[in-house]
Amino acid sequence: MARLPADRTMGGDGALARTAGDFAPACAAAATLPADPPAARHFFETHFAAYAVGEDVLTGYYEPELRGSTRRDGPYQTPLHATPPELVQVDLGQFAQDLRGRRTAGVVRDGRLQPFADRAAITGGALDGRGLELAWVDDPADAFFLQIQGSGRVRLAEGGVLRLGYAAQNGHPYYAIGRALVENGTLTRETVSMQAIRAWLAEAPPGEAAALMNRNPSYVFFRPLTELPPEAGPLGALGAPLTPGRSLAVDRTRTPLGAPVWLAAQAPLRRLVVAQDTGGAIRGAARADLFTGWGDAAGAEAGGMRDPAALFVLVPRQESPAR
């Protein structure tokens, strides 16, 4: 955060809106903070103001591992794409104050920003033949959930692991396909989970599975993370590796990135976390997604997490504290 321009908007709404410069005094103080609880308590009480923003659903996300290849061959038929060069990312907050923290994407045609291809068009071949494929994986559902998680590891058939991070999104709104399964009676609100959705996709005819996934028009593009060590988490929205159990995805239009957040969910999930990431399904002041790590155990924990939780956002004080 210290490397960002002081006027860079970190997000937040109303009393919670902050820029990178607002965090500078707290960042400088944290660099010299001794590692003991009384000092930490004094640090937070001095430099931050706490806001209760309400209660909403807490879910989890993780870094999955997929099976794939850099070549389209055999079972590896589902592509993971790099960002098309014509895709234009737009920060809507630069055009209207009430859209701070909101973003969209599209393609410019005839001098106008037009919607980009949606998931159905892309999976139908809209980007074929352009050399945008970073890898090919053996399961369309794995590719779909990789896009929801935003980052992942592809264990390559030719050897090695390719780590991929979020690069861009096609600008279409996110639709939770579990909602469709609840609406048609296949699942209930109590039983819907990532595991239940994946089980349905695995058992459904390929055409029906594809049709359900295409109900979500949002499509995510990736970039290789060649210098990220295997023991580090994926990169969040701030460009820093995520920490299992301590990194939180938030709605940046309501909560500024970089802010500490006290998470009060069901025991033992009562802890201090940091708003380090965002997500297409994370909308609302108290809606949040907790990063659980990587691997099967982290996936099981994330997939089963759907609990009520209260959030208390800590934002840097607007004025320097009295000395």
Image: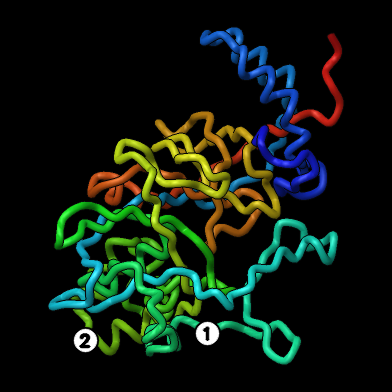
Residue at position x 30%, y 40% from top?
230
Q: Residue 5 at what x, y percent from top left?
A: 74, 41
Q: Position of residue 224 (x, y in %)?
A: 39, 57
Image location (x, y in percent) of residue 242: 45, 40
- Give the left or right position of residue 23, taking residue 78 as reference: right
Q: Is residue 323 visible?
A: yes
Identified at 21% across, 56% down, the residue is 155
Q: Quick check: 182 above or below 243?
A: below
Tag 2 residue: 205
Residue 172 seen in the figure: no
Residue at the extreme bottom of the image, as rendered:
110
Dot placed on the residue nearer the N-terminal end, 2 or 1: 1
User: What is the number of callouts on the image?
Assistant: 2
Instruction: Between residue 30 and residue 41, name the one nearer to us.
Output: 30
Q: Is residue 133 above or below residue 166?
A: below
Closer-to-camera residue (4/144) = 4
Query: Where residue 284 sits: x, y (%)?
Result: 64, 56
- Residue 213, by quadrant, is bottom left
Q: Nearer the viewer, mark 2 or mark 1?
A: 1
307 sits left or right of 194 in the view: right
**Mark 2 residue crowding within 10 angstroms, few (<14) / some (14–19) / many (20+):** few
- Helix, strand or loop for disc 1: loop
Task: Inspect the image, locate mark 2, and give the three-letter code of the amino acid beneath it.
Answer: Pro
Residue shown at the point (44%, 69%) measured from the top left: 82
* Quadrant of the rendered image containing residue 159: bottom left
Residue 117's label in the rendered image is 1
Q: Secondary structure at mark 2?
A: loop
Question: How is the model colour-coded?
Answer: rainbow
Q: State the quadrant of the C terminus.
A: top right
Residues 73 and 78: in front is 73
